[in-house]
Image (tube, rainbow, N blue to C red):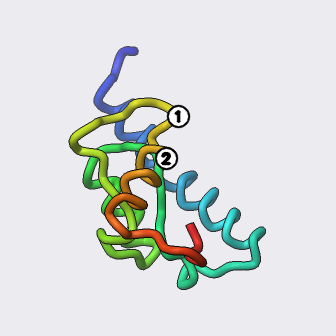
C-alpha cells in the first residue's frame, strides 16, 4: 500500500456508511424504526467511530458497550457485547437488540 494513511481514511469512510446502511436495512426488514432500537451490539471499532454510529442512530452510550477492555476479538465482538449488556442489566426482556 503506497498511501496507508489515505487508504485508512477512505476505508473508514466507506465502512461507517455501510455499518449504518446494514443496521438501518436490518431494522426496516424487521419492521422496526431506529427509535425502537433499545441496544446495539456492534463490531469493535475505534472509539470515535463507535460514538458516531450511536449518534447517527440516536442512541445513548448506555445502549451499547464499547469494548475498550477487550479490543477487537473478531466475529464474537457482538456476542461479547450482548453478554456484557445482559450482565449489566442494559438489556431486558422485550428489548429490540
Q: Is residue 22 toward the left or the right of residue 89 in the image? A: right
Q: Nearer the viewer, residue 33 or 21?
A: 33
Which residue is nearer to you in this view: 24 or 37? 37
Residue that badge 1 annotates: 75
Q: Position of residue 86 (x, y in %)?
A: 42, 61
In the image, is 34 to the left or to the right of 31?
left
What residue do we see at 40% from left, 30% from top? 73
Q: Residue at x 59, y 73 (%)?
A: 96
| Disc 2: which residue | 78
Q: In this rendering, is residue 37 above or below 52?
A: below
Secondary structure under tag 2 reads: helix
Mark 1 is surrounded, within 10 Å at the Cα level, by few (under 14), some (14 to 19) or many (20 or more) other residues, namely: few
Total marks shown come to: 2
Judged from the image, the secondary structure of the residue bearing numbered disc 1 is loop
Residue 41 in the image, given as x and y percentages of width and height: 47, 56
Point out the image quarter for the N terminus: top left
Give residue 27's position: percent from left, percent from top.
Answer: 67, 70
Crowding at dot 2, Cα within 10 Å, few <14 / some 14-19 / many 20+, comes out as some
Seen as rendered, the residue at the extreme left is 69
Q: Measure how far apart labels 2 and 1 are at the Cα level.
A: 7 Å
- As displayed, is residue 76 above or below residue 85? above
When asked about the image quadrant of residue 12, the answer is top left
Amino acid at each position: 500500500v503506497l498511501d496507508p494513511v489515505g487508504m485508512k481514511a477512505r476505508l473508514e469512510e466507506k465502512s461507517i456508511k455501510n455499518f449504518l446502511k446494514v443496521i438501518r436495512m436490518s431494522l426496516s426488514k424487521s419492521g422496526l424504526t431506529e427509535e425502537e432500537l433499545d441496544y446495539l451490539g456492534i463490531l469493535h471499532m475505534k472509539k470515535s467511530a463507535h460514538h458516531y454510529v450511536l449518534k447517527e442512530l440516536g442512541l445513548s452510550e448506555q445502549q451499547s458497550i464499547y469494548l475498550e477492555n477487550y479490543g477487537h476479538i473478531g466475529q464474537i465482538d457482538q456476542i461479547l457485547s450482548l453478554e456484557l449488556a445482559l450482565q449489566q442489566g442494559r438489556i431486558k426482556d422485550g428489548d429490540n437488540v
